Image (cartoon, rainbow, N blue to C red):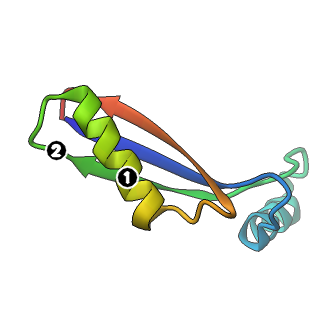
């Protein structure tokens, strides 16, 4: 079973990397794009096929190490086939 974690900055938290991307896109003529935000994705493969256990374990990993919950949001997707 695979857990896909998408992490993004919370609204109101400055995103200098997103701003730099937005400025670069505008310089290249892509000026129709506004409010660019960046994030990251973490993919975890589990031996278990117990969906609830994988979700529980993944949430614990996020809260303990993977996500700075003060400034970041996260979303977990579970995919059965790897």
- Crowdedness near tag 1: few (<14), some (14–19) or many (≥20) residues, C-alpha within 10 Å: few
Residue 30 position within the rendered picture, expressed as x and y whole percent measured from the top left: 83, 51
The residue that appears at 25% across and 38% down in the rendered structure is: 54
Check the picture and name the quadrant holding the C terminus: top left
The residue that appears at 57% across and 66% down in the rendered structure is: 68
Q: In the figure, is residue 68 to the left or right of 14?
A: left
- The residue that label 1 is drawn on is 60
Residue sitting at the far left: 47
- Crowdedness near tag 2: few (<14), some (14–19) or many (≥20) residues, C-alpha within 10 Å: some
24 in relation to 79, above or below: below
Q: How many marks?
A: 2
Mark 1, mark 2: which one is toward the viewer?
1
17 in relation to 26, above or below: below
Residue 39 position within the rendered picture, expressed as x and y whole percent measured from the top left: 60, 57
Nearer the observer, 15 or 52: 52
Q: In the figure, is residue 50 to the left or right of 54?
A: left
Which type of secondary structure does the marked residue at label 1 adopt?
helix
Disc 1 versus disc 2: distance between alpha carbons? 14 Å
- The residue that label 2 is drawn on is 46
The residue that appears at 86% across and 58% down in the rendered structure is: 12
Q: Earlier in the sequence, mark 1 or mark 2?
A: 2
Nearer the observer, 34 or 39: 39
Which type of secondary structure does the marked residue at label 2 adopt?
loop
For the residues labelled 1 and 2, say whether their Cβ atoms are less than 8 Å apart: no
Residue 69 position within the rendered picture, expressed as x and y whole percent measured from the top left: 60, 60
């Amino acid at each position: 079973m695979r857990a896909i974690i998408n992490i993004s900055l919370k609204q109101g938290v400055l995103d200098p990397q997103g701003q730099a991307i937005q400025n670069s896109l505008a310089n290249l003529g892509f000026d129709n794009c506004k409010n660019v935000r960046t994030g990251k994705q973490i993919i975890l493969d589990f031996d278990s096929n117990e969906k609830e256990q994988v979700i529980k374990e993944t949430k614990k990993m996020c809260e303990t190490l993977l996500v700075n919950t003060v400034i970041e949001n996260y979303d977990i997707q579970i995919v059965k086939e790897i």
